[in-house]
Amino acid sequence: MRDLNTNSLKNNIKKLTMDKNKEIKNISIKEIQEWEKDFSKRKGLPPTDKSDAHQAMVVGFLKLSEEVGELAEVILRKQYEEIPAEVSDVLIFACKIGKIAEDYFSQTPLSGEIRAKIDYAEKREYDKSSKDLTKPKGDFKNWKNKN
Ligand SMILES: [Mg+2]
């Protein structure tokens, strides 16, 4: 089953890379991460191994910050047609950072963490007086460890 999923993922990445006219109707976080990892490898971008993984994450974070700034700019300028492109840039760099943490520092895959985040968010209620969501059983980290 794992091999089948891995092969299916590799085929999807190959399609993303090879068929430039293919419309992407659905794409998973894992597919974005695998495409980005494959892209970085083909282009000679870090990380190449654990020795430069932290530095690659730092650079990835700086790029993410740059892209968040670009998104802020198009929102402030009401350039709505630019928003999907800038949100895409943000997602790609965020996925890259998560993938490096997963591959080189044994952290939870983003897909699993997002599952936990969604479950946690569903437990929260909007408090009109504080204009914020409640935090059940402390913060997310405490809640996640107990559930
Ligand atoms: Mg951009």
Image (cartoon, rainbow, N blue to C red):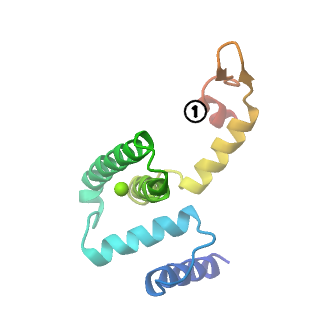
| Rendering coords of residue 63 (x, y %) | 31, 51
Task: Work out which residue is located at the far top of the displayed protein and give it.
Answer: 129
Residue 91 visible? The answer is yes
Where 127 falls versus 91 (above or below)? above
Report if the beta carbon of the residue with label 1 is closer than 8 angstroms to ligand 1. Answer: no
| Rendering coords of residue 8 (x, y %) | 60, 81
Residue 102 visible? The answer is no
| Ligand 1, image quadrant it occupies | bottom left
**Could you tell me the amino acid type at mark 1?**
Lys
Task: Work out which residue is located at the far bottom of the displayed protein and give it.
Answer: 18
Tell me the element at label 1.
helix
| Residue 129 placement: quadrant | top right
Where 138 falls versus 54 (above or below)? above
Q: Quadrant of the C terminus?
A: top right
| Rendering coords of residue 119 (x, y %) | 71, 42
Please give the residue where the numbered disc 1 appears in the rendered image. Answer: 141
Q: What number of labels is visible?
A: 1
